Amino acid sequence: MRWRAVAKDGADPPPAQVIEQEARQIISVGETYDYEFRPAAKGDLRLEVLRPFNRTWAMAKVQVR
């Protein structure tokens, strides 16, 4: 999956960071990010939040119709 950054902590990112990239982001306490993406096809997607060493912390299923 690929996405494009549209905001970080409520502010527009620098133009160099507004590019489509791999849908993966490391964050720290208090940070927020907004991304947009366009799914290539209908179906089920999964959003995962991982702790260090790739241990699943949370997961959400998303249906694309």
Image (cartoon, helix red, strand yellow):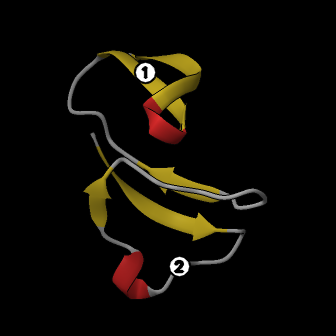
Q: Residue at x 71, y 61 (%)?
A: 31
Circle 1 crowding by C-alpha within 10 Å: few under 14, some 14–19, many from 20 = few
Question: Does 43 sit left or right of 32 as displayed?
Answer: left
Is 50 rendered above or below residue 43?
A: below
Residue 53 lies, with reference to residue 25, above or below; the image says above
Q: Position of residue 59 (x, y in %)?
A: 55, 20
At x 43%, y 21%, the residue is 46
In the drawing, does residue 4 fall left or right of residue 6?
Answer: left
Residue that protrudes farthest toward the left in the picture: 40
Residue at numbered disc 1: 46
Identify the image quadrant of residue 57. Answer: top right
Relative placement, left or right, of 4 versus 31 is left
Tell me residue 2's x, y (percent).
28, 47
In the picture of the structure, the residue carrying the numbered disc 2 is 13
Q: Amino acid at mark 2?
A: Pro
Residue 12: x percent and y percent? Answer: 59, 78
**Local SS, label 2:** loop
Task: Determine whether the residue tagged by mark 1 lies in a helix, strand or loop.
Answer: strand
Residue 59, numbered label: none
* Residue 30 location, quadrant: bottom right
Above/below status of 13 relative to 3: below
* Residue 64 vs residue 61, the one in the foreground: 61
Q: Amino acid at mark 1?
A: Arg
Camera-side residue of 23 and 39: 23
Q: How many marks?
A: 2
**Outermost residue, right direction?**
30
Q: Quadrant of the C terminus?
A: top left
Q: Which image quadrant: the N terminus?
A: top left
